[in-house]
Amino acid sequence: MSDAIIKVESLSRSFGSLQAVQDVSFQVHQGAIFGLLGPNGSGKSTIIRMLLGILPPSSGNASVLDLDVQQDAELIKPRVGYMSQQFSLYGDLSVQENIDFYGRIYRLDPQRLSERRQAVLQLAGLQDRKSQLAATLSGGWKQRLALACSLIHEPDVLFLDEPTAGIDPVARRHLWDLLFALSGNGVTLFVTTHYMDEAERCTDVAYIYHSRLLVLGKPSQLKLLPEVTPENARRYELRVPSPANLLSRLRPVPEVLDATLYGETIHILIRNSRTLDSVLRDLGADADAADIREIPPSLEDVFVTLTARAQQQVKEGDELAQTISPMLPDVSEEPQSRQEQPDIAEANFDKTPADRPSAAIRDSGSRRLSTWSGLIAILIKEFVHIRRQPTTLFFMFVVPVIQTIIFGFAIDTQIENIPTVVFNMDGRQQSRELTDAFSNTRRFRLVDHVWSESEFQQALSSGRAKVGIRVPPDYVDKLLRSEQTHLQVLIDGSDAQVASTALSTAQLLGLNLSIELATAKGDALQLAPARNATGQGVLPVEVRTRLLYNPDLISSHFFVPGLVGIILQLVTLFLTSFAIVRERELGTLEQLFVTPVGRTGLLLGKLLPYALVGFVTLLTVLVVMIYVFGVQIRGSIALLLCLSMLFMVCSLGLGLLVSTIAKTQLEAVQFAFIIMLPSVLLSGFAFPRSEMPLPIYLVTFGIPATYFIEILRGVVLRGADLLALFPWVAGLFACGVFVLSLSVMRFQKRLSN
């Protein structure tokens, strides 16, 4: 391996028309503290992500530890550590649980994990806080924890993306003391920062602006650049009373190239053609009272000067000029504050990376990483997450029971008690018996008797009644004369289901009344179309009906089995998609991408806990179905559970698919509802699919819940076996394979932007 740990050659990255990084080249040597500086949006984080192998470059080449960042990304990850710009550890895990999680990710055996845990806790000063939840730590302690987690596997290279952003000065100094200790033990540090005092501490510095590298070199070399302090100019520190008032008058002076306020002093760059004393006298200031001393340029002067030049070049449309100072291969030059580093107790850091136990383990064959890597670590972490989230436990175990009970009782397709108004213009006994017959069917509920046509019409038009029965004044007279009488039933057709029920019930009631009257008259006249064994007149044909599976027509027996499938999909879909999208929002998913966890291990570790939760949810809802609603399972329980697991895999795949599309939890909610609505409305759960228009009917075959609801009702209500359910099982299997394959294909262990 050459002395250069990191090599970057003409590296570029664009996002559509946006050029984030353009033609950047540099090298970082072993043991160096390499500082990459630049304003927000200049491309610093993008460079780190490309070097970590989680963001592919658009062009150019880069290597870390002699491994290509594109071809050997998974081999680089076990040998590097990463602290992201945003705190990206798990707030609901304790300090020790976070450290143990990353130790398992890097496949440390229990004994080695215990040793390394004590070492990094001691190094970061976290021994007394190991049981504290990470979310309750202050900013400085969070950064210490992030550093400890990134060091658990003794990396050869440590990438730190603005590690001191947002923390207080004392915490910043302590963190840099730790970094000096690491550098002294041979760890190469790649640091991005906004702070000039931190840049002064680096052995090597690069400054990137507008996606281009402007300057590269050691701090002491950069301060000597002719662009910073021209040969015909000098820098002074000027201490005068009311420096802010003087500053505004100094800047317009032609000989003054730059003037900046530093606390109670002014740093000024002035041409040698004029003395500062003469300028002060011309401005009416007391030159004799002023304290003037010549000073060297600072790194801030370097970057301000180069940025101003770059801005002018961009404004004029010129190509940005680069100033590259020689990068010396040795790392003997110590940063200014190196002598201030604390005396760190052993901390299990050996002097050379090759002598470390983890390096020996890697060299002995761990370069061939398995795609199952990290499965156990992800599983343990996910179960701790679930245990620490009361709202999630409530959603998994209580909400399904509530949903089952509410939907089971609330959804009822039996139409009863249709509001009915009666206009009886006859009023005699037989006409009153007729209206009583309508009420006795329980389908009609008599809400009023009216006595005029206007009242009758008003009751229907106002919606107070859905059905109106008009009995003619000669109803009984025609019956006595054996003449056909006409009974008018007016039905509000705005609700098709109510109207069809009222229509069929009224027609059936009329038929029964006619048969009853005909039979009675036939018996009286000793005439009948047919007689039974006792000599009584009966209808020629007797039709006997029998209802199978649900003889009492209890709607809950129809809806509750289907509700099991809807709730199961709801729980697995939402929990899975939210869990992954939440990690993406917090930055913890990016942190996982940098580790050697395999894609299969990551996916199964994320999905299996929710599969187990879904299975418990299934059992809970089935218990409610049996003991609350009295719906007995007629078929094989084992078959039902196996096919439910098949559906659960499909639902987990849908959740994973949502997580690959949604970038925020709000988007995950929206996409999840987009999936759930067709599952509720078009799967046959609430409305018969056979009555849907042909295009929509064909669409229902692409909904996994369609097949599972048919399976549920077949096993639970009809006692169907696997052979009888084969078409539905095959359809569900095909949907599961398609959804899971699409989800896994879209879920890449790298960033898309």
Image: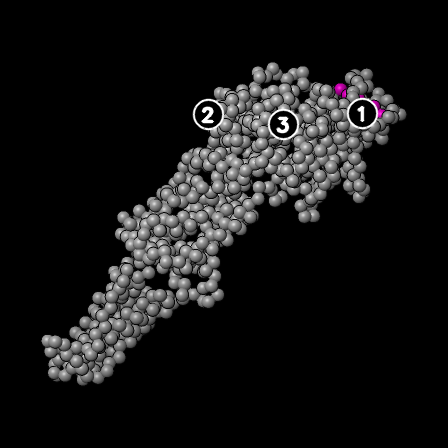
Whether the residues at callouts 3 and 1 have beta carbons within 8 Å, the answer is no
x and y percentages locating residue 145 in the rendered image = 54, 27
For badge 1, the amino acid type reads: Leu
Q: Main secondary structure of the magenta part?
A: strand
Q: Quadrant of residue 447?
A: bottom left
Residue 564 on the magenta segment = no
Residue annotated with mark 2: 131
Residue 399 seen in render: no
Residue in the picture at 34% in, 47% down: 621
- Mark positioned earlier in the residue sequence (3 or 1): 3
For badge 2, the amino acid type reads: Ser
Residue annotated with mark 1: 224
- Mark positioned earlier in the residue sequence (2 or 3): 2
Distance from the alpha carbon under mark 3 to that under mark 1: 32 Å
Mark 1 nearby-residue class (10 Å; few <14, some 14–19, many ≥20): some
Residue in the picture at 47% in, 63% down: 698
Tag of residue 675: none
Mark 2 or 3: the one toward you: 3
